[in-house]
Image: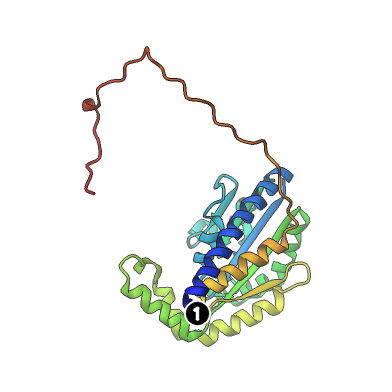
Amino acid sequence: MSDKKEFKKKYEDNLKNFQIELVKLQDWVIHSGKKIAIIFEGRDAAGKGGTIKRITENLNPRHCKVIALAAPTDKEKTQWYYQRYVPYLPSAGEIVIFDRSWYNRGGVEKVMEFCTEKQYVDFLQSCPEFERMVISSGTQLIKYWFSVSAEEQMKRFKSRAEDPTKGWKLSPMDLESVKRWDEYSKAKDNMFEHTDTQSSPWYVVESDNKKKARINCINHFLNLIPYQEVHSPEVVLPDRVQQKVYERPSRSIYNYVPEII
């Protein structure tokens, strides 16, 4: 077996096993009433979205939500900065994944000058305290930073530009980030200096290889949560009872979707 095929098989086997464990973890979260919030941050095209999809693929969407907020409205810009994120924090029995979060202010807003210097400094000072309040309320907060090289990011941008199904992923902000690589690096380093705390640490995921990043991140997440398997009663399907007294309407009265294959 070639190295490429061997890696693919190892990836698929690990992913399948981990997704089974993720379902067990969610069952435990629901059963125990735990609250888990996961933050995914990193440069554009770092692989956050693909990892989130693999995590949530087989989970119950009623108890696992992905939050990806659009740019703040004029009204939201006048609010306390964290206000629009607070309603999405998890309740008992929920896992909430933030695809980008309040750390927008520490990254894109700082680099693109969407916030004032005072707002930026206030964020760096208040963020650890805000996260302490979230954690003290009973929420387990987990923060992942996906790290991608400049060369790999550009390769992924080009792939998006050439793929008609992925063009929407390539925004003007993405293109601008190419010109401001060093500014984003400085902002990220400064953000880590202030918010990589003992109570709420950052976990860095090397993501030049997307599949490795997914497996490593999911494995790390599973090992962070002290979940236990919840034993549920065995599901026994009943025999279907054929109703002989009811005559179904003719199929000709309904509008069916044309079959093309």
**20 horizontally vs 178: left or right:** right
- Most foreground residue, 238 or 101: 238
Q: Where 244 sits versus 42, above or below? A: above
**Where is residue 257 shown, x and y percent of the image?**
25, 40
- Most foreground residue, 180 or 41: 41
Q: Residue at 76% across / 53% down in the picture?
A: 137
Q: Where 61 sits versus 250, above or below? A: below
The image's colouring method is rainbow
**Where is residue 253 shown, x and y percent of the image?**
22, 25
Q: Residue at 70% across / 73% down in the picture?
A: 195
- Most foreground residue, 211 or 207: 211
Q: Which residue is mark 1?
A: 3
Q: Where 99 sits versus 260, above or below? A: below
Mark 1 Cα shell of 10 Å, populated few (<14), some (14-19), many (≥20): few
Q: Helix, strand, or loop for circle 1?
A: helix
The image shows a total of numbered marks equal to 1
**203 horizontally vs 55: left or right:** right
Q: Residue at 47% across / 82% down in the picture?
A: 152
Residue 114 in sight: no
Q: Residue at 75% across / 58% down in the picture?
A: 135
Q: Where 7 sits versus 96, above or below? A: below
Dividing the picture into quadrants, the one containing residue 106 is: bottom right
Amino acid carrying label 1: it is Asp
Dividing the picture into quadrants, the one containing residue 36 is: bottom right
Residue 238 in sight: yes
**Where is residue 240 shown, x and y percent of the image?**
47, 24
Q: Residue furthest front?
A: 1
**Where is residue 235 shown, x and y percent of the image?**
60, 35
